[in-house]
Image (tube, rainbow, N blue to C red):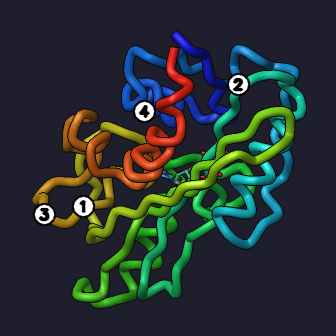
Amino acid sequence: MQSIIFATSNAHKVQEVAEMLGDAWQVQGLTSFPQVELPEETGTTFEANAILKVEAASLALPGRWVLADDSGLEVDALHGEPGVYSARYAGPKATDADNRAKLKHELAKLPPSVFRGRFHCCLALAKDGKVLHITQGIVEGQLRLDEQGSGGFGYDPLFQPDGFDDTFGVLPAEIKNQLSHRARALQDMKIWLKPHEG
Ligand code: ITT
């Protein structure tokens, strides 16, 4: 089994990627490497921030395969917000619940017919500070004003992927992990990782 580090402070992301990569890879999050500090996300695109995170973490973890993702929700009628600011939409120390409350507040000003949006994930792989591969994944869907379910994390209880009548907060993890933005970005990454599997 090969080992890979997912440079994130978000335990939900680690769990999703570990489930999606399967038995060939042992995935460790940054809780196992408390000495690694992620940089401030100063980029204006998901790709720029994913690169910032993966370069810094892989420099701090010599010789290791390191993944990082930058992801978020883009709502068309809110001009792509919260976008790269998804984790801090309601402020620098916002919780997921704070961010959902702010999104509901903004959506409530609009007619429900325009509640279209998508989750976007940019996933980057690096070793020794060198970026080796970058992939993107998107899942389109509809935002809701009422939270549904408590599964997943972040905006999941407000996001209903196209083709489903339930939110990611209600749908089982196996379904989210087949069609999510992160699943799609990882699908392309898996092709690159395949020859390196243990
Ligand atoms: P790291 O930077 O440490 O990886 P983070 O949670 O701050 O952790 P991001 O900067 O990429 O990660 O911000 C992503 C935010 O976008 C996240 O906090 C959620 O609010 C939202 N988000 C991303 N993927 C999501 C998903 O699968 N389901 C629900 N919300 C998601």
Q: Is mark 4 within 8 Å of ligand 1?
A: yes
- The mark that comes first in sequence, 3 or 4, is 4
Is 48 left, or right, of 106 in this rendering? Answer: right
Pinpoint residue 172: horizontal percent, then vertical percent.
21, 36
* Residue carrying label 4: 16
Of the residues shown, which amino acid type is indicated by label 1?
Pro
Pinpoint residue 63: horizontal percent, then vertical percent.
81, 22
Whole-Å distance between the Cαs marked 2 and 3?
A: 35 Å
Of the residues shown, which amino acid type is indicated by label 2?
Leu
Asked which secondary structure carries label 4, the reply is helix
Q: Is mark 1 within 8 Å of ligand 1?
A: no
Whole-Å distance between the Cαs marked 2 and 4?
A: 15 Å
Residue at 71% across / 14% down in the picture? 32
- Does 77 sit above or below residue 123? below
**Label 3–label 1 contact, CB within 8 A:** yes
- Does 48 sit above or below residue 28? below
* Residue carrying label 2: 30
Q: Which mark is residue 161?
A: 1
Residue at 85% across / 33% down in the picture? 128
- The mark that comes first in sequence, 1 or 4, is 4
Is 69 left, or right, of 197 in this rendering? Answer: right
- The mark that comes first in sequence, 2 or 1, is 2
Q: Characterize the local packing of mark 1: few (<14), some (14-19) or many (20 or more) Cα atoms within 10 angstroms.
A: many
